[in-house]
Amino acid sequence: MKKFIALALASVMTLSLAACGGGSDAPASDVAGTAISGDTIKIGVFEPTTGENGGGGMQEVLGIRYANTIVPTVDINGTTYNIELVEVDNQSDKTAAVTAAQSLISSGVVGVLGSYGSGVSIAAGQTFAEAGVPAIGCSCTNPQVTAGNDFYFRTCFLDPFQGTVMASYAAEEMGYKTAAIVSQNGDDYSTGIAAYFKQAFEQLGGTIVADETYQTNESDFNAILTTVKQSEAECVFIPCSIATATLILPQAKANGLQAHILGSDTWENESIVIAAGDAAEGVVFSTFFDENDESTPMAKDFVNGFKAYLNEDAQRITLNGGTDGVAAVSALGYDGYMTMVTALASLDGTEGDLTSVNLRDALAAVNYDGVTGNITFSETGDANKDAAYLKKVEDGKFVFVKKQIDETK
């Protein structure tokens, strides 16, 4: 455990950008923001519902939509405001993300939730900051999302922690001495967490014997898998999208790859298991939440309520990957919405016009006990989260392995 803690600190210090801004007491810019008018408050939902991250993005949207059914209004200064969700599809694409963000600002949103996918969140960050509209990233884990941006927050842990968790599992829990890495070239999330895993694994005495990359939308991984197989790596870390996982797992099996496949939070989608079948058996990945963990007061009620919500409509089950399993990103989407509403409610008593900049300041001071744990923000706008869950695929199901605590928090 002490070795893990030291690695967590080293990873943050060595590979993270020098973060500035975020959840400080006052925003660095003097933008006016967007004023709240009438009796409706618009909250943007900035998520991929198509493209390679569409599956995970849709699960996050479902968590946000469910939260809106639970708390559809907020009272501020004697007025009951209806909370309207304005949804856009950023298409899992950085260019489309900027256009989607601009459309949200034009629609008059005062806050934004999203996105699943760090690359699109980073791409849109400046658009939100220049407009003075705060965004809460529910599951985007790359440090660059909030770095230098006073208007971006997040409710999840960061990749330095997640990469170290997986490296610690491989080296200390499983005793692996050699590892391979397969990551997506040009993708901030995939290459970022791969770098954190590599650093931590090597610091634990392991050796990276293959470090392979693939291009966006690539579908044939046979050459890469052949290289990994020839390296005789004991495990292979593959931080990739749901779509890529469904392709690479059957190809790994067909190539006779014996290395233990390790994934990251994006792997928690049951469509992967459905598509890959027994090729997914044994995969271990890190994630943010476990539906069977009742250590937080709200978790059980959320899980029961969200499952009921999904089962009310067959289309929701389809959008959730074909099951009523509760994905961690759905819980984070729910918490992101509730954190935003908590900050809005705290504006009660504010004099003068209510604006998105007021909301940003309220978020910096928010304290919300959520489904995924207590949520407060650091000076960089990052959630003060200290736990990751490890799960594995066993008999076609996601099974809890362990909960990893970062005692440096």
Image (cartoon, rainbow, N blue to C red):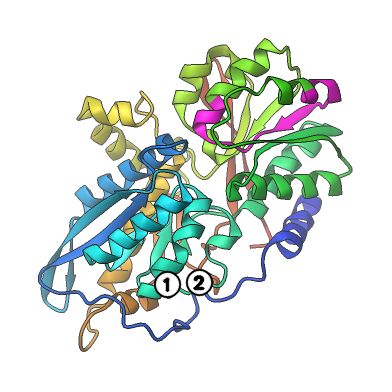
State which tag comes first along the sequence, 2 or 1.
Answer: 1
The image shows residue 68 at horizontal and vertical percentages of: 23, 51
Is any atom of residue 366 visible in this view? Answer: no
Residue at position x 24%, y 54% from top?
Answer: 86
In the image, 94 versus 231, the foreground residue is: 94
Hey, what amino acid is under mark 2? Asn
> Which label belongs to residue 129?
1
Q: How far apart are marks 2 and 1 (CA)?
A: 7 Å
Q: Is residue 115 above or below residue 313?
A: below
Mark 2 Cα shell of 10 Å, populated few (<14), some (14-19), many (≥20): many
Q: Which amino acid does label 1 sit on?
A: Ala
- The stretch of residues the image draws in magenta is 227-245
Image height of 28 relative to 55, above or below: below
Mark 2 sits on what residue? Answer: 149
Q: Is residue 99 left or right of residue 180?
A: left
Which residue does the image show at 56% across and 27% down from the upper left? 245
Would you call the spot at circle 1 few (<14 residues within 10 Å), some (14-19), or many (20 or more)?
Answer: many
Q: Quadrant of residue 12?
A: bottom right
Residue 383 lies in the magenta stretch: no
Percent position of residue 46, x then y: 35, 53
Query: Does 29 sit left or right of 206 as displayed?
Result: left
